[in-house]
Image (cartoon, rainbow, N blue to C red):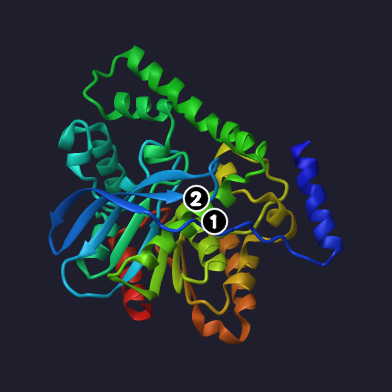
Amino acid sequence: MMRLGILLISCILSIAGMVYVPRAGKSVRPEMSVLAVEDRDGYECRYVEFVVGKDDSGKERVRAYLLVPDRGSKHPAVLMLHDHGARFDIGKEKLVRPMAEVLEDGLEDHIMKSSRQWIDKNFDGVYLADSLASLGYVVLVADALYWGERSSEDAQRWSELSYGNHQMTKAVKDSIKVLKNSVYDGQKVLYDELYSRNVIWAEKMLRDDIASVRLLKSLPFVDGKRIGAFGFSMGAHRCWMLAAFCKDVKCGVALSWMTTLDREERMKASDYSMAIMPMREQMDFGDIGKYLAPKPMLFLSGTTDHLFPKGKVEVAFKKLQKHYGDCHDKLETLFFEGGHHCGKEVQKTIIEYFDNTL
């Protein structure tokens, strides 16, 4: 029934010669509270809470890390958007070194250990948000809905068993497996629940990300004309969606999420957080370029990325380039040697891009 409704919307729009545009809406006026502060080398890490959502039913207070350089009055800023990774216990902690003070067991907390493992695996042991802050950027990283502090009880229990001080008995391993499957399958449950309230999960995520940009722009130490966005994997999808539909984002870096749409492929649970079906019925992913141009964008992809094969990415890059047309100098599409990974060499490219663009 849901599929029929989506198809009907797409058919009506196509007949009218229109393309579906996400319901980005208007975020509420930012209301931020600082809950904890930690001095770091050349910058300050602030654990903050702010409002997303517009009405009583959609309003929610979201926790985030805000990194603020020590020197200077007005700084460029980067909204950093975390990945999916089928790993839900952490969100903002995939990009920012967690504050021990806000974790129940401090440095030995399961969230701290989970974060370190993720960073070692995907970022060569480097917290990229902290790197940018040390170079003079204000950085904001918030949890997307279903990740980090917005994740389910099952996700947190999975994390406690996986990274807490538990002996890995067969019973514990079996519990971890059950919890992991429950959380993974829960993505479709959440999508359906939101859809029953006329909310598309990916649009909700987009609105939350726009609220984050609006918060950054409201801060007295941020130059509102120099706000960029970065995302890895699902974060890259969030990045190019945000850059396309939020005028306050001046440029974006999307790492390891661009491909061609396979219309025969069945939806997986991990697709639901990124699926705005009326758009997918009408457009391929590379066609987002029609909304991005002439905004400066850098798209990066690994030559051996198993999730985004090079051949499909090349086709998508050509579509992006076609939409940029006469402003092709504003778009960079690059391949790097490697897989689905944000290693130190790739991080250098990202930082250099922001230095040159912001």
Question: Which of the 4 quarters of the picture holds residue 31?
Answer: bottom left
Residue displayed at 34% across by 58% down: 140
Q: Quadrant of the C terminus?
A: bottom left
> Which residue is under mark 1?
309
Residue at (65, 41) in percent of width and height = 267
Residue 186 seen by the camera: yes
Question: What's the residue type where badge 1 is placed?
Answer: Pro
| Horizontal arrangement in the rendering, residue 11 relative to residue 68 (left or right) | right
Q: Residue 14: where, in percent of width, then height? A: 82, 61
Name the residue tied to disc 2. 306
Closer to the camera in the image, 204 or 336: 204
Label 1 – label 2 distance at C-alpha: 6 Å
The residue drawn where x is 31% and y is 44% is 118
Crowding near pointer 2: few (<14 within 10 Å), some, many (20+)?
A: few
Q: Are marks 1 and 2 in contact (CB under 8 Å)?
A: yes
Residue 331 x %, y %:
51, 77
From the top left corner, tell me how far across and down residue 285 is, in percent.
62, 61
Between 220 and 113, the residue placed more toward the observer is: 220
Please tell me in which quadrant of the rendered image residue 157 appears: top left
Placement of 86 over or under 96, stated as above or below: above
Q: Which of 56 and 212 is in front in this view?
A: 56
Residue at the image position 62 percent from the left and 46 percent from the top = 200
Is residue 230 at all visible to an observer of this figure? no
* Label 2: which secondary element: loop
Question: Is residue 74 or residue 147 the one in the foreground?
Answer: 74
Which image quadrant for residue 126?
bottom left
Residue 32's place in the image compared with 322, above or below, is above
